[in-house]
Image (cartoon, helix red, strand yellow):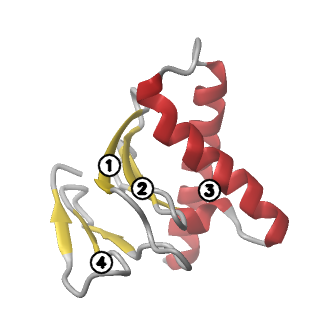
Amino acid sequence: MYLEEKKNDRETYERIVARFADAQGHSAERADLASALDWIERSKTWGNRPEYSIVSSPDGAYAVFTTTDKPVLLIHLATLAAHRLVDSGGSYRSTPVARSPDSQFVAFVPVDRTTTTKSDPY
């Protein structure tokens, strides 16, 4: 199951990159998404894989980007609208993220905190 989820995460990432590249202009509201995509692309040079920085919802409507030193972002895949769940990820590792099987919730524990945070809708 984990390998299939990561395959879906990889495919979701590739769709986001393609749609982002096709978008007309990059407004300030997409700055967080642009920064996250740039970090993920640069991280490939040291062996990171894009699917390790994204968790997609089972229904394919949302994805969460979790990258080191960047905001944890909830991305609405139809519009590429980004919503910050956490202003900054961990300084040395990404924020762990889990999603509910029904795509209704996402849970995460920022590395500088000790409590789980639940966000909805997911």
Query: Is label 3 in a helix, a strand or a loop?
Result: helix
Helix, strand or loop at mark 1 = strand
* Up/down of 9 relative to 11, above or below: below
Q: Residues within 10 Å of mark 3 (few under 14, many from 20)?
A: many
Q: Position of residue 112 (x, y in %)?
A: 34, 81
Tell whether 79 sits left or right of 93.
left
Residue at the image position 56 percent from the left and 79 percent from the top = 92
Please state which amino acid type lies under the numbered disc 3. Answer: Arg
Q: Are the two marked residues, 1 and 3, in contact with CB atoms closer than 8 angstroms?
A: no
User: How far is the residue under mark 2 from the one under mark 3?
Assistant: 20 Å
What residue did someone put label 1 on?
Answer: 84
Q: Nearer the viewer, residue 104 or 67?
A: 67
Q: Name which residue lies at 39% across and 26% down.
A: 79
Whichever of labels 4 and 1 marks the residue nearer the N terminus, that label is: 1
Left or right: 80 in relation to 106: right
For image coordinates 22% across by 60% down, the residue present is 102
Query: Based on the displayed image, in which of its 4 quarters is residue 89 positioned?
Result: bottom left
Say which residue label 3 marks: 10
Task: Name the spot of residue 31 as percent of width and height, x first.
Answer: 50, 34
Is the residue 75 above or below the residue 54 in the image? above
